[in-house]
Image: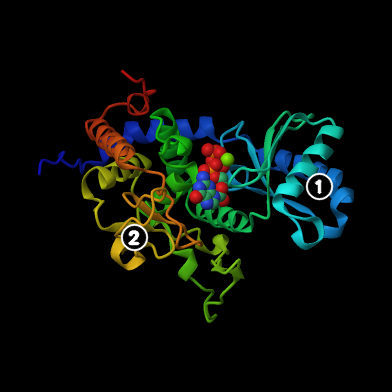
Amino acid sequence: KKTTPIITDPQSFIQLTDECVALFNELKPIAGEYARRMKVLKRLNKLIYNYFSDGKPQLHLFGSSANNFGMKNADMDISLVIDEKHVGSPKRIVLRLGDILKRKRMLEVVCLPRARVPIVKFKDEFSELSCDICINNTLAIHNTQLISTYSKIDIRARQLGYVIKHWAKCRQINEPYQGTLSSYAWIVMALHYLQTRNPPILPVLQNMTAPGEERKKVEVEGHDVYFYSNWDSLREFGTPNTSSLGELVTGFFRLYAEEFDWNDSVVSLRTGGYLTKEEKQWAKQTNDRDNILLTIEDPFEVTHNLGRLVDRSNLKVIKYEFKRAYKLAASGKPLSKICEEYVAD
Ligand code: GTP
Ligand code: MG
């Protein structure tokens, strides 16, 4: 097997590191963006409260507005937490929400009550932010908190996540509707990569407890969503590993270009290691929809493969992109070349 020679001289990563840091600074939202979004959320909360007061409605942010990996003008993913016993099915709630939002003069209100996940989409009239509201997506609120906690432990986690997300968007492999990976899946892979460095840059929060405490179980919709959330106590966790961002980005590409065992391995952020497809019972595909070619375990919903949309042809594309990116990074090409917009020929 022919492999690209591994650069070991840290000097060679200085340029790539500088470029990655600059990209991160350009992509990350300005200070105060989260507060701005929380204000929009608060206003929406007030606006709908009276219409659903029986069900004690509460809007929560999830996804990139709240996980610390959001781009400047990303959509707001919102989940309405509500007692369905009192106010009816998600489908009905979505239709009712749509009516209220139209009456309150929100822009471009569209209801999708029959989608796999019923949602209402609109643009907030003041901030002009695009919003999606779904109903009782509680696991998403928890995994958003998990991702956000990881992002605060070591600055390189956030930086690597942004670079990988940007690369995947530019190379058109962040398109779940076309069968490649969601942003969420890319972030999970990046964080898992940092857990598996030697020495590790990130801990395994789902296995950790405070000193002297036993691991508790926190159950939500039948899943254990416990994780150690005191990131402030972990700020020094990654410091024994002095790898630069450029080295990590290159190493991430190398892992999936040359080292990862696509046939048997499952990426597991929950355990901070690899599981086998065999032990997850993902060795044989059981239906047409859920592929098991690229297997990434959801940290809480452990039977859920974040790579289920990746079929044979998209797997080929993703593998090609890893090889391409690794070759360019390892031969000292600039980040702009690595992240060059993909154009179909
Ligand atoms: P951008 O919108 O691209 O900036 O990224 P995002 O962080 O909002 O990610 P994405 O739109 O992929 O996912 C939004 C949220 O949906 C995630 O943060 C998760 O909380 C939740 N989610 C849970 N399971 C899945 C899944 O299988 N696929 C996706 N796409 N999202 C999931
Ligand atoms: Mg989103």
Kindly identify which numbered label has been placed on residue 45: 1
Residue type of the residue flagged with mark 2: Trp
Is ligand 2 less than 8 Å from the beta carbon at label 1?
A: no
Can see residue 69? Answer: no
Q: Residue at x 43, y 37 (%)?
A: 163
The quadrant in which the C terminus is found is top left
Q: Is residue 197 above or below residue 4?
A: below
The quadrant in which the N terminus is found is top left
Q: Residue at x 50, y 58 (%)?
A: 235
In this view, the mark in front (1 or 2): 2
Ligand 2 sits in which quadrant? top right
Residue type of the residue flagged with mark 1: Asn
With 60 as the anchor, is 13 left or right in this view? left
Image coordinates of residue 253 in percent, x first then y, are: 30, 41
Q: Is residue 338 above or below residue 98?
A: above
Residue located beneath label 2 in the image: 282
Is ligand 1 less than 8 Å from the beta carbon at label 2?
A: no
Relative to the observer, which residue lies in front, 342 or 243?
342
The reply to whether dot 1 and dot 2 touch (C-beta < 8 Å) is no
Relative to the observer, which residue lies in front, 269 or 296?
296
Residue with the most extreme left position: 1
Kindly identify which numbered label has been placed on residue 247: none
Relative to the observer, which residue lies in front, 81 or 161?
81
Q: Is residue 318 above or below residue 201?
A: above
Image coordinates of residue 107 in percent, x first then y, are: 76, 28
Relative to the observer, which residue lies in front, 47 or 330?
47
